[in-house]
């Protein structure tokens, strides 16, 4: 019984270009969909038909992320890249957050070397990272162990422990959008080694679907006490401090710092141990953007309460004026938990979102920026801030960092409840909060 | 007590028998059995005997062998063999075998350059040099480094 060796279909003469028929589109798609990103890019260059198949595989936006806790920076970078680029994806941008025991410049160089010159890369050193381990697949929220030397405050000691040697990589693919990184640098009193980047995007509609970004905020602050008005205000720009006295709203008497704090402690009672206090200052200012005068805008800004004496209350940062009204806020984990529950509800609504036209919306990724004051020591359990997203969107890429100040402009201002002013008072820089960025894609009908 | 057997005939007219119990992992075959068209010899004009031997081996093994061991089934197979296997699995709608073959194929081609891919799959480059240049420039991170 002769068994001829396998050969392509005899109807196809040798030497003529074989096309997809030899394999079949579906089969080719099945194969290339399993390729890691670099190989996938090669496959897309083989021929026109292969290119079309690849476009079908990678037609929706994608977010990919991985963390590594390897002691060696080089190995850690390899591990996160291998994991984050283990599936078809074309990096349009990358964000790398590293631990303080790694060298920022070196990390940035290693990453840009891997991605080439055209992909915008942001490398930063946050207060901690949140993401999935590239090797073990375990989801972790890790905050650095920092001890400060007395003689050099703000400079982290190089810890030999593994917790401070870490890297988290986020890679995104956003078809139809252009992504750029814009540096925003702010001088602060203590040594600041973060590069805060802001991604700006504008979309050119391809007609096949729409990518959307939605910010959802969870607050961890609870108001306490009455409303005050700033009376005497002295700004210390060099130290980025402000000294203030205040009046109770409606009363004329000027109160000193110590008296104010006593009033606040009286209001708070024994409810919270070791609270961190902030004042939320309502500022009505004339604003302009560039040359254009926008007009009056009212915003809410938080200033950390640093101390008091028999004259003044000391708060961080500047920008307060006489007449600005403010309230005290304190960090409160039970408020944070109930705020997280609200976030979960809103995420569930996003999940169910089928728009009226019958288009389906699919969430393909999420990022979280959570205050370094939150985390396991604040809540008493691990991964609390990650739970809303992980529970509602299991299997969807999710990552984030711990920060000192969270920028987020959600729909709702959670600090001013049920008042007419709610919508017109902006608060964009939060403390003790977790800001979630939810990325979704709505494919148009029939695609 | 004899089990129900099915008979397949390959493209090159060789006959193979297999227990129906194992054969119905192929959705195509299962449909035939349910519609009662599987009583006589089932012709498979798209599948060569060499490939069909492997398919039958897989179907027989699948029931008794652990998943990890089953993965070894595709070890040390050539790309052309795997392609034929994948095509047969697609035609017969055997998801497990298709996944196994495609996974292995992806693994084998993942380190290949564009030129190597063209050679292995006998694909002619139908891009103009400018088009190809532009394409590679789109993913500089894959080619530049």
Image (cartoon, rainbow, N blue to C red):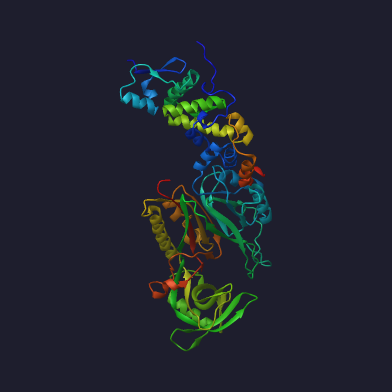
Q: x and y percent of residue A324 in the render? A: 50, 80
Depth check, front residue: B123 or A160? B123
- In this image, A99 relative to A61: left or right? right
Please identify the residue farthest to the bottom as the structure is shown: A252
The image shows a total of numbered marks equal to 0
Q: Nearer the viewer, residue A399 or A262?
A: A399
Residue A89 x/y as whole percent: 55, 45
B69, above or below A432, in the image: above
Q: Residue furthest top?
A: A1
Q: Position of residue A27 (x, y in %)?
A: 49, 33
Q: Is residue A145 visible?
A: no
Q: Please give the name of the residue rendered at 50% of the width and 87% of the height, measured from the top-left corner.
A: A254
Q: Is residue A380 left or right of residue A156?
A: left
Front one among A54 and A384: A54
Residue A319, x across and y down, in percent: 57, 77
**Residue B107 appears in the figure:** yes
């Amino acid at each position: 019984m002769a068994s001829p060796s396998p050969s392509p279909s005899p109807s196809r003469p040798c030497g003529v270009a074989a096309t997809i028929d030899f394999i079949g589109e579906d089969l080719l798609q099945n194969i290339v969909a399993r390729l890691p990103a670099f190989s996938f890019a090669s496959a897309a260059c083989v021929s026109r038909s292969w290119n079309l198949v690849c476009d079908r595989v990678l037609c929706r936006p994608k977010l990919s992320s991985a963390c590594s806790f390897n002691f060696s920076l080089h190995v850690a970078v390899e591990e996160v890249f291998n994991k984050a680029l283990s599936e078809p994806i074309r990096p349009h941008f990358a964000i790398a957050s590293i631990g303080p025991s790694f060298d920022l410049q070196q990390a940035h160089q290693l990453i840009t070397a891997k991605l080439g010159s055209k992909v915008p890369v942001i490398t930063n050193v946050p207060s901690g990272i949140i993401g999935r381990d590239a090797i073990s697949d375990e989801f972790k929220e890790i905050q650095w162990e920092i001890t400060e030397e007395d003689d050099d405050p703000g400079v982290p000691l190089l810890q030999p422990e593994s917790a401070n040697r870490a890297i988290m990589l986020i890679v995104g693919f956003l078809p139809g959008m252009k992504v750029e990184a814009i540096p925003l640098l702010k001088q602060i009193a203590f040594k600041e080694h973060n590069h805060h980047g802001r991604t700006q995007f504008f979309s050119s509609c391809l007609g096949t679907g729409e990518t959307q970004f939605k910010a959802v905020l969870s607050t961890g602050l609870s108001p306490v006490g009455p409303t005050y008005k700033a009376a005497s205000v002295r700004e210390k720009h060099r130290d980025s401090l402000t000294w203030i006295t205040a009046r109770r709203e409606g009363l004329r008497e000027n109160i000193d710092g110590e008296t104010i704090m006593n009033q606040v402690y009286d209001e708070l009672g024994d409810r919270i141990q070791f609270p961190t206090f902030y004042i939320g200052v309502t500022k009505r200012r004339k604003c302009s953007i560039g040359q254009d005068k926008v007009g009056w805008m009212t915003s809410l800004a938080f200033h950390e309460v640093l101390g008091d004496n028999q004259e003044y209350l000391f708060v961080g940062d500047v920008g307060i004026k006489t007449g600005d009204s403010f309230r005290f806020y304190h960090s409160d984990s039970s408020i944070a938990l109930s705020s997280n529950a609200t976030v979960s509800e809103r995420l569930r609504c996003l999940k169910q979102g089928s728009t009226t036209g019958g288009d389906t919306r699919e969430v393909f990724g999420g990022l979280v920026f959570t205050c370094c004051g939150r985390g396991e020591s604040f809540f008493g359990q691990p991964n609390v801030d990650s739970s809303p997203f992980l529970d509602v969107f299991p299997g969807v890429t999710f990552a984030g960092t711990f920060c000192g100040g969270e920028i987020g402009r959600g729909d709702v201002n959670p600090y001013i409840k049920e008042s007419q002013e709610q919508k017109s008072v902006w608060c964009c820089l939060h403390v003790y909060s977790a800001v979630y960025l939810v990325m979704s894609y709505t494919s148009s009908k029939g695609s | 007590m004899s089990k129900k057997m099915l008979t397949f005939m390959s493209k090159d007219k060789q006959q193979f028998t297999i227990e129906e119990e194992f054969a119905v992992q192929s959705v195509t075959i299962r449909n035939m059995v349910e519609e009662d068209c599987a009583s006589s010899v089932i012709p498979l004009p798209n599948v060569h005997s060499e490939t069909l031997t492997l398919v039958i081996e897989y179907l027989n093994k699948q029931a008794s062998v652990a998943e990890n061991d089953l993965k070894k089934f595709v070890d040390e197979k050539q790309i052309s063999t795997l392609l034929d296997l994948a095509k047969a699995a697609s035609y017969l709608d055997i998801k497990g075998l298709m996944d196994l073959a495609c996974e292995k194929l992806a693994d084998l081609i993942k380190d290949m350059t564009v030129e190597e891919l063209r050679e292995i799959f006998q694909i002619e480059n139908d891009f103009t040099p400018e088009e190809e240049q532009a394409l590679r420039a789109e993913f500089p991170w894959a080619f530049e480094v």
